[in-house]
Amino acid sequence: MPTRPRKTPLRKTRTRSRPSPRLARSPRSSHARPASREKWVYLFDEGRADMKDLLGGKGANLAEMVRIGLPVPPGFVVTTRACNAFLSEGSRFPEGLWAQELAALRKLEKRTGRSFGDPENALLVSCRSGAKFSMPGMMDTLLNLGLNDAVVEGLASETGDARFAQDAYRRLVQMFGTVVLGLPHEPFEQVLERYRHQRGLQNDSALPLEDLKAITEAFQSLIREKAGRDFPQDPVEQLRLATEAVFRSWKGKRAVDYRNAAGIPHDLGTAVNIVTMVFGNRGEDSGTGVVTTRNVSTGEREMEGDYLSNAQGEDVVSGARPTLRISALKELHPKLYAQLGRICQKLERHFRDVQDVEFTIEQGRLWVLQTRDAKRTAQAAVRIAVELVGERLLRREEAVLRVKPEQLDFFLHPQFAPDDKKAARERGDLLATGLNVSPGAASGVVAFDADTAERWSREEKKAVIMVRPETKPDDVHGMLAARGILTSRGGRTSHAALVARQFGKPAVVGVSEMEVDCERRQLTVAGRVLREGDTVSIDGTTGEVFAGRLETLIPDLKDPYILKLLKWADDFRELGVYANADYPRDARKARELGAEGIGLCRTEHMFFEKDRLPHVQRMILARTDAERDEALARLLPFQREDFLGLFRTMEGQPVTIRLLDPPLHEFLPNHDGLLHDVTELETRLELRKGRPGTAELEEQLARKRRMLEAVESMREANPMLGLRGVRLGIHLPSLVRMQVRAILEAACQCAREGMRVLPKIMIPLIAHSNELRVEKETLESEARAVMKEQGQKVAYQFGTMIEVPRAALTADQIAEEAEFFSFGTNDLTQTTYGISRDDAETGFLSEYLHKRILPENPFATLDQRGVGSLMELAVKLGRKTRPGLDLGICGEHGGDPKTISFCHRLGLDYVSCSPYRVPIARLAAAHAALASR
Ligand code: PEP
Ligand code: MG
């Protein structure tokens, strides 16, 4: 066949095109059932960006780009509904689909002036998955459909590049074997490796034509042998089987795992995009690349990405060949670079967000193959959202909604301690520097495959760094389980980088000097060998890789963009955000991070301090009231100082102080340990009998025995349901009086100094309003006494936690005594479920979660149906009695965005969470308020 270079540009329609002879003859098409009314297939120019449900993200955006006049290769989309129908009809095409797909193919032929299966003028297409939400690399795609033994010859003569044509065919047969027929990758890779090895080559791009021919034949034999069928020479059959394979890939394991992790519903289905092929591997004036319209690591306003000359898209994403930075395109093809810049700007303004754009240059002509909202680091997300407001592309509330509350975790993310890092460098532990593709720091043991990473992390509770040459979609479960990801290959848009950024995992990729040998389970870098299980530290913010473990620090929230975004969030939110803080240093941090009060100070934490514990124990073990009062008197000044510190730090903001809650045995030595000590001392005394120097031992033994007796007298079968909370206060009123006195004395002192104070005294674990009445009497008489002594009046509030179902069910009675409720959802979850929170989370609860008996850990995200119903009832009953009842939450759930949204809907006044979750809670509260507008 004579060489006939293709002169006609792809989009230019030829006046006369020969329809594919195979279209009419397709055996399946001749059996086509009568067309259904449902429109299963849309040409690109029939769709729009807002049709993502039906056309998937990729298809809808391709359609939109066609609408706004960007250069997109012609194509059509098979809808997500078609996919769902196929999957629910036992893998059969729904009625009318195939006829519509063939009709669209015919239109594509017309539009391109080419024919599917025509050796002299072949139309080649790709068949790409594309769900509503992007699931990078999780589903299947096939390229170069339409090639067969005859067409490859035609393409060779048409392009004058037989090697190119053969390589395209080789790729199709390989993809067909693995994707459509489900054969493993290895045998195909082994064939390629054999030929590369024979030629002493590193990659496939230099394999000569005759090798590619032999490889294609070998692949065809492999298919025959392993799949028991021939590679289909009929392009129409290829298309049908490819469409089916892409449909099926929606249900593939890696797609299902990814959806589970990303919270994407399983019933959306994928669309299938059939797109005219354009080739980036047609010589030096061709290439392919991926760019983001801004820097998605930092948010800076600069186009960023990778480019590969003379290559196809998969070469960029797989990281198989080292890419150039996109700025290299400026040197190579300045006009195309400028065109790309203009396209990026247009896309960004049109979609009002940073875009991730895939493009191909075919012999000097630029084609856009995809655009989507770019995945970005938290840092970039915040900066971009704030800057887009400045550029008048977004309103403030939209910017606030653009950043997920959990993303703020990054700003509070561990970073390596600078001193430790410096010391590690000086020790020579800095092994290499790679690409800093996902910020944050992580140390952990090296695991060389995803299963090991997952097992070590889940079952053995190890911090793991997953190390691979490059990652593949099959590795995602290991990446999710690992603390961080490290690869020797790949760029900023590699699979590893994308997935890490999305899930906020620190990641360093493309550490080219590191050799990863997964067979021998070791990596070699800078002359050092690290084996599986050795510890490594990665800094995803700088790209550094260290041997050993480094100390990590939580950074301050100083980024100007985040400060601005949080300020906007505060303007929108209706919930107050308080912090759970026990010490002035926690309170300071909480205020720095935006807390407006303390929602829970757990006073028992103060009791555990070294200088107080002996007095606490004496108080507990006291045999007379006088002994107890004396111990309490020693504790009083400590407590007063604690509260003074908190009041001063909070400067008039509410400070909620909970009276002592835990069972007293927690302040005493452990029973089994004491028993052991007593037995040991008894044995030693026995051995020394009659010898001098036993007096001291005898005294020690007597002390231990006294303690053991006391501990035994206090033992309870279920201490968490025993003498604790309000019950303890009723049992030991002098303890309540001491705590109230400390609070009021501190408050009076502040008031005297001219400072505003707002103490809120909170009683834990109430179940019956009578408990509260008794406690209130003790408390109020002591408060009155203190204020009288001090000659000072301070306003304080008296309230309770709602932590057991009975309290919620009788909240109307409880509200008669209490001025505020704070939902202690840790205990409320424990008592509603009847699950011990101390044991469950490390015990059977993980099995429950694994088996999906529970959809979420109810100690992390509030069980809205169960525990939430009790809260709802308590809110209703409480406010019926006392309309102005102040309501908050202080269990761990108070920092969880989903729970915060629920609390907003319940009409609570505030949420209280640990200081480091305060920014997340502020943003989540704004989201909740904006969502309910
Ligand atoms: C609770 O039960 O939710 C609570 C805040 O109290 P603690 O966790 O101290 O029991
Ligand atoms: Mg509690």
Image (cartoon, rainbow, N blue to C red):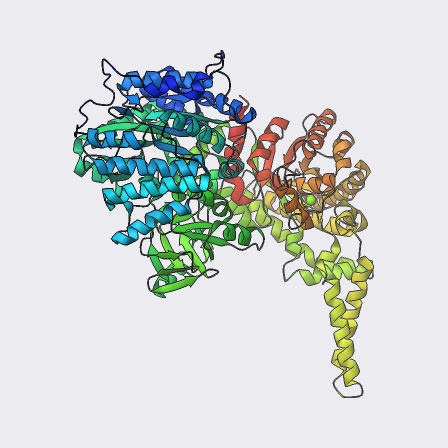
Quadrant hosting residue 283: top left
Q: Is residue 430 above or below residue 70?
A: below
64 above or below 529?
above
Left or right of residue 902, residue 919 in this image: left
x, y percentage for residue 212? 28, 42
From this viewpoint, is residue 43 visible? Answer: no
Residue at 67% x, 37% y is: 823
Q: Is residue 317 left or right of residue 805?
A: left
Which residue lies most toward the bottom here? 691
Residue appearing at x 79%, y 69% in the figure: 705
Foreground pick, 171 / 760: 171
Residue 103, picture quadrant: top left
Picture residue at 71% right of the left edge, 26% below the top: 876
Q: How many marks?
A: 0
Q: Quadrant of residue 615?
A: bottom right
Residue nearer the viewer, 908 or 22: 22
Report if residue 606 is visible in the image.
yes
User: Against 326, is 347 above or below?
Assistant: above
